[in-house]
Image: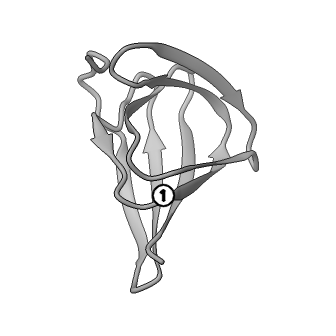
Amino acid sequence: MAFTCTIPARPTVQVDDDRVRITRWDFEPGACTGWHEHAMPYCVVMVLGGTLALHDGTTESQVTLAAGDAYARPSGIKHDVKNASDHPIAFVEVEMKR
């Protein structure tokens, strides 16, 4: 089960073409993406650093990332992401279509 969350993170799609989908995600404290699964491999680059709480349906983990930090994940991972910081955070997510 994912987080109990009443504050949705705000996605803003910046590019969506035949190669990539680039989305900026803005999170108020406690905001979540909602339970989802990526159909494509993707990478994330932090814009405003903070602590992300990640839930895979079974376990919750936390990671603190600074502005400019990045990570990549394969497609097919079901998860929810929550801002576990006491301040807003943001990241840019790049999903690779090819």
Q: Callout 1: few (<14), some (14-19), or many (20+) C-alpha neighbours within 10 Å?
A: some
Indicate left or right for 49 with 60 as reference: right
Residue 86 occupies quadrant: top right
The residue depicted at 42 percent of the width and 61 percent of the height is 40
Q: Position of residue 38 (x, y in %)?
A: 37, 52
How many numbered circles are shown? Answer: 1
The residue depicted at 28 percent of the width and 35 percent of the height is 34
For disc 1, the marked residue is 24
Amino acid at pointer 1 = Arg
The residue depicted at 68 percent of the width and 37 percent of the height is 49
Q: Quadrant of the N terminus?
A: top left
Given residues 14 and 44, the one toward you in this image is 44
Q: Looking at this rendering, what residue extends furthest in the bottom direction?
A: 18
Indicate left or right for 45 with 59 as reference: right
The residue depicted at 65 percent of the width and 24 percent of the height is 63
Query: What is the secondary structure assignment of the residue under circle 1?
Result: strand
Q: On screen, 50 above or below 90?
A: above
Q: Position of residue 56 (x, y in %)?
A: 40, 25
Q: Position of residue 10 (x, y in %)?
A: 35, 47
Q: Position of residue 67 (x, y in %)?
A: 73, 44
Q: On screen, 59 above or below 74?
A: above
Residue 62 occupies quadrant: top right
Q: How is the image coloured?
A: one colour
Q: On screen, 95 above or below 10?
A: below
